């Protein structure tokens, strides 16, 4: 059913076929609307389609990341690990698309380059990279917060004669690093996951670090059939808990303050958290770790000692300890033998705060200290998070006002879903949306948007 405007191609257009876009399509079809999803990739998955680098996996427990809207889906899908890897995650999302027959309403290899509001017809017109245009009453962006990669502003990136790629644009075919000289630029969450895997097979790995991050052990493990059966019986309670915790994770902050217990109790608790899987050490810690500077320093000192105990070279260990921020003030990367990677003879760390990169050369990387030769350069340099996905699309609202210009003057939204002057444009996980265990947040976003559209009908 197309709503009253007969000049429309669809009632609603959704940009992106990741976790957000798939669920939004499902919900709008339930309303009886005609919907088209435009996806620039060749398959579903969003973040998990693009990010195929070695070591890519959940940092939320797999079962807490799953869609909650279908009991049948929950009952039939078996997770193999507590923190699933990218291939399994992508298979899950492909299964969702197949199960609910979503593919028939998704157009792949379709890069949306502009979206313009027509004041006269009160509709949106999107234009694809190939020039094709489509009109709808509602426009919903499911473009993701980790979909627009950023490369460092280093001279000569295009001059390198070896192979190079950003972690979020990893080749779809296997990459053979055996015996090769490899560089990784960046030690954020993606860099950490990549380094701990690539270091196992390279001839030599050189890591270029600007600043270190506070990491915690992942402690991943397999899920056997009996455990999966038990998890299924607890889904309702788990999703309810996620709805009540900070950022939608399954972990609940301890009710005690850091200094309300003895030093012995404090360190025993931290040892317990350090030995436990996932974000418990971040989200399940003492309640004041993120608000009391002294409590945060005590926790950071505890972790600094852990790093010193895991890295053999004392000088190198100090370079891996953050000095510019406390533990948990940023999202905490979870690792598996990341620090032990630096004990390997074929792995070295270059602190580019001391010896900055001057340029990329034909053969490798030149710092202020020396030139390094490489076969591969991996850019683990992150994303233009949240805004990058919007800025790459020329979005214009009432009176042709550009969204980018409006946000540069004042970043204001209604509940993170809408912004003034852009009628019937809804944003899933846009600016001001809560970040954390994102599928939990995405479901609330999608359900709110769907309820508004249902009311408007």
Image (cartoon, rainbow, N blue to C red):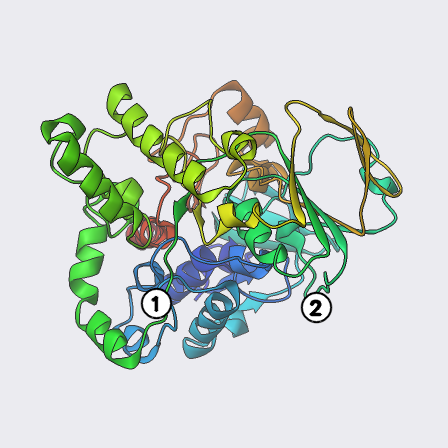
Question: In the picture, which quadrant includes the C terminus?
Answer: bottom left
Q: Mark 2 points at which residue?
A: 173
Question: In the picture, which quadrant includes the N terminus?
Answer: bottom left
Identify which residue is drawn at 60% across, 50% down. 344
Element at badge 1?
helix
Residue 239 % position (x, y): 22, 58
Residue 155 as seen in the image, left or right of residue 144: right
Identify which residue is drawn at 52% across, 68% down. 87
Residue 369 as seen in the image, left or right of residue 43: right
Total number of numbered discs in the rendering? 2
Badge nearest the viewer, 2 or 1: 2
Identify which residue is drawn at 71% across, 64% down. 175
Query: Mark 2 to mark 1: distance in Å?
Result: 37 Å
Residue 358 % position (x, y): 79, 26
Disc marking residue 30: 1
Residue 362 % position (x, y): 89, 42
Residue 67 higher or lower than 447, as above or below: below
């Amino acid at each position: 059913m197309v709503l009253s405007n007969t000049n429309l191609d669809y009632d609603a257009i959704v940009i992106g076929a990741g976790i957000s876009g798939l669920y939004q399509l499902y919900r709008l079809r339930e309303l009886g609307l005609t919907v088209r999803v435009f996806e620039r990739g060749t398959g579903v998955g969003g973040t998990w389609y693009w990010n195929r680098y070695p070591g890519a996996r959940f940092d939320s427990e797999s079962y807490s990341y799953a869609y909650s809207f279908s009991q049948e889906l929950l009952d039939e899908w078996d997770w193999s690990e507590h923190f699933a890897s990218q291939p399994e995650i992508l298979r899950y999302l492909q299964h969702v698309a197949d199960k609910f027959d979503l593919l028939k309403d998704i157009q792949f290899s379709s890069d949306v380059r502009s979206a313009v509001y027509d004041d006269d017809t009160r509709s949106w017109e999107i234009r694809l990279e190939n020039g094709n245009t489509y009109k709808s009453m509602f426009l919903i962006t499911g473009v993701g917060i980790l979909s627009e990669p950023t490369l460092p502003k280093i001279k000569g990136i295009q001059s390198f004669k070896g192979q190079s790629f950003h972690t979020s644009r990893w080749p779809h075919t296997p990459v053979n690093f055996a015996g090769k000289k490899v560089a990784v630029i960046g030690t954020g969450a993606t860099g950490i996951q990549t380094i701990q895997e690539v270091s196992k097979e390279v001839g030599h790995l050189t890591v270029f670090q600007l600043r270190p991050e506070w990491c915690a052990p992942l402690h991943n493990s397999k899920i056997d059939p009996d455990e999966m059966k038990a998890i299924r019986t607890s889904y309702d309670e788990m999703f309810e808990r996620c709805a009540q915790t900070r950022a939608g994770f399954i972990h609940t902050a301890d009710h005690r303050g850091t200094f309300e217990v003895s030093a012995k109790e404090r360190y025993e608790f931290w040892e317990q958290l350090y030995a436990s899987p996932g974000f418990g050490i971040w989200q399940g810690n003492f309640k004041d770790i993120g608000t009391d500077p002294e409590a945060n320093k005590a926790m950071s000192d505890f972790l600094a000692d852990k790093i010193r105990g895991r890295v053999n070279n004392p000088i190198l260990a100090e370079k891996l300890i953050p000095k510019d921020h406390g533990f948990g003030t940023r999202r905490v990367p979870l690792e598996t033998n990341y620090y032990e990677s630096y004990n390997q003879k074929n792995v070295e760390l270059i602190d580019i705060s001391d010896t900055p990169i001057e340029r990329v050369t034909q053969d490798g990387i030149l710092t202020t200290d020396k030139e390094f030769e490489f076969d591969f350069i991996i850019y683990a340099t992150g994303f233009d998070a949240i805004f990058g996905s919007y800025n790459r699309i020329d979005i214009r609202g009432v009176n042709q006002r550009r969204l980018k210009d409006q946000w540069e003057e004042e970043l204001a939204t209604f509940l993170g879903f809408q912004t003034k002057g852009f009628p019937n444009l809804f944003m899933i996980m846009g600016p001001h949306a809560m970040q954390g265990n994102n599928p939990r947040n995405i479901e609330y976003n999608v359900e709110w948007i769907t309820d508004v559209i249902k009311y408007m009908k």
